[in-house]
Image (spheres, grey):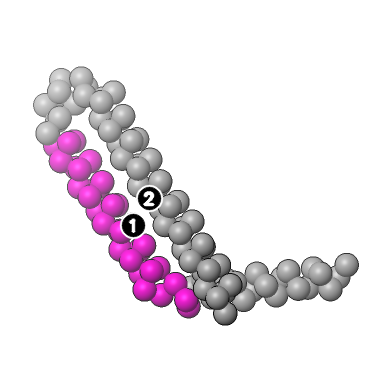
Amino acid sequence: MGNHESRIDAMYARDKFAAYICVLAVWAVYLFVYWRMFDQFAGSGLQWLMLGLGGMVLLLNTAAVVALVRHYREDKAAIYGTDLYYLDRIAAERRAAR
């Protein structure tokens, strides 16, 4: 049973890491695009609007990922337990086919 829980914890840790890396990537892309487009935004008087809209997107995206990670933590036994069940069945079928 301990092995099962450690596998669930490992899967959760990988998913959490990937989710946070994706959030960082989205932040980096938004900041890079804003930096590169700043002159065009300023020339048309939209720099504050675009900064506000981009900030809202980043805030909502980050909040959604944090909520997703929290949900996965609360339900990780059900979520990853099902995955492990089917991964173990596939592995057993492959071993039996050899």
| Local crowd size for mark 2, using a 10 Å CA cut-off: few (<14), some (14–19), many (≥20) | some
**Magenta span: chief secondary structure:** helix
Please state the extent of the stretch shown in magenta in the rendering. 49-78
Left or right of 2, for residue 23: left
Q: Position of residue 74 (x, y in %)?
A: 36, 73
Amino acid type, residue under disc 2 in the picture: Tyr
Is residue 91 among the parts visible in the rendering?
Answer: yes
The residue positioned 26% from the left and 57% from the top of the image is 63
Q: Position of residue 95 (x, y in %)?
A: 81, 69
Image quadrant holding the N terminus, namely bottom right
- In magenta segment, residue 76: yes
Q: Regarding mark 2 in the picture, which secondary structure is present there?
A: helix
Residue with the mark numbered 1: 65
Q: Position of residue 40 (x, y in %)?
A: 21, 22
- In magenta segment, residue 66: yes
Left or right of 51, for residue 58: right
Q: Looking at the image, which residue sits at the far front?
A: 2
Q: Is residue 17 above or below residue 74?
A: above
Residue with the mark numbered 2: 20
| Local crowd size for mark 1, using a 10 Å CA cut-off: few (<14), some (14–19), many (≥20) | some
The residue positioned 14% from the left and 30% from the top of the image is 46
Q: CA distance from mark 2 to mark 1?
A: 8 Å
Taking depth in this image into account, of 76 and 44 the one nearest to the observer is 76
Amino acid type, residue under disc 1 in the picture: Val
Q: Are marks 2 and 1 in contact (CB under 8 Å)?
A: yes
The residue positioned 40% from the left and 47% from the top of the image is 22
Q: Position of residue 93 (x, y in %)?
A: 78, 73
* Picture quadrant of residue 16: bottom left
The residue positioned 40% from the left and 46% from the top of the image is 21
